Amino acid sequence: MAQQNSVISGKVLALSGGVGGAKLARGLAEILAPEQLTVVANTADDFDYWGLRICPDLDSVMYALADLNDTERGWGLAGETWQTIAAMRRYGGDDWFQLGDQDMATHLFRSQALRRGDSLAQVTAKMAAQLGIGLRLLPMSEQPVATRVHSDIGELAFQEYFVRERCEPAVKSLEFSGLAQASMQADFAALLSDRELKAIIICPSNPFVSVDPILSLPGCRDALASAAAPVIAVSPIVAGLALKGPAAKMMAELALPASAVAVAEYYQQRYGALIDGFVIDSSDAQLAAQFRTLAAEVEVCPTVMTDLDSKVALGQACLQFARRFAN
Ligand code: FO1
């Protein structure tokens, strides 16, 4: 990855869900040297399927960082084939969650390594290195945490809600099973007390199912608050819509208005004065004044990432914004 002129010296931490977060992580990877950047991905979407451990957000970030992701479908690998799932269908096996033939190697390799005793961070690092990724990609935790969706059709595992039911059930509440017994992945926790850490960026990922599981890990909120670096959050809601996924629909179901301000208010209500600055899209510029009542700084810039240039531009804007908080 060719580095562009870095606007920050020191280390940067990006907290990410799947697709939206992966795009910003890819932009940051273009700007920063590999040793400067750590990306921590949500693992509360993880589940077992066909006897394999599936980690969709970690994989979305890994594939995007390696430029191997399918940008049209939004998940999985580009140039994928689907012979195994077709054969699985012939047996009458589960086919509601689609695993491509190449993607399956990721799940097989990971599941085998985990069974042999590797940690999730270790096997992720091995795969990332083989895909040419130099930066550090970490799972939020080594312990399993599973998002449970309490919905109008009953309780669902996250992927059952997201993929099998196509996000159609109305969400009543969310629960992160296993969270109380989980801890932050060790390198993630250590980075938060590193004096070299200069920016913590919450990527434009779903606040409820991608960011909350990370920030709700025991000790995470306080460790972020006491980190030397400012915490910058990029709004996943642009002009009242989620660019991808069910965030705006979930907000309506949770009785929150779908707006960048409501996301900021939600974070403030749940985590207190944790977030120092919010990045909102230019199309939401008229909302900027409302952030003053939240005692948070706001940066207005284009946040919709359609190509590498726009990913890099948003990355640069986040880093420049973070620098403004340096004392
Ligand atoms: N998303 C879908 O909408 N349908 C699928 O069949 C599907 C399969 C899949 C396989 C591997 C993988 O890493 C991701 C996959 N995703 C699929 C995406 C995934 O459900 C979501 O990106 C995240 O869990 C939401 O953050």
Image (cartoon, grey):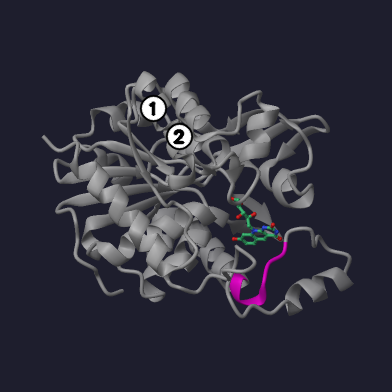
Quick one: quadrant of the C terminus?
A: top left
Residue 55 shows in the view: no
Instruction: Tell me if residue 216 comes above or below residue 30 in the rendering.
Output: above
Check contact, mark 2 vs mark 1: CB within 8 A.
Answer: yes
Residue 195 placement: quadrant: top left
Residue shown at the point (43%, 72%) measured from the top left: 66
Tag count = 2
Image-based side of 277 in relation to 89, left or right: left
Q: Find the magenta span and give its range.
A: 98-103
Instruction: Tell me if residue 251 comes above or below residue 235 in the rendering.
Output: above
Query: Which amino acid type is marked by label 1?
Result: Ala
Image-based side of 126 in relation to 148, left or right: left
Image-based side of 37 in relation to 103, left or right: left
Residue shown at the point (30%, 42%) measured from the top left: 200
Instruction: Tell me if residue 39 comes above or below residue 74 in the rendering.
Output: above
Residue 70, given in percent of the width and then of the height, sits at 58, 71
Q: Which residue is mark 2?
A: 286
Residue at far front of view: 286
Residue 241, given in percent of the width and then of the height, sits at 61, 43
Residue shown at the point (41%, 28%) measured from the top left: 218
Instruction: Tell me if residue 300 comes above or below residue 174 in the rendering.
Output: below
Nearest the viewer among 21 and 303 is: 303
Q: Which mark is drawn over residue 74?
A: none
Residue at far left of view: 327
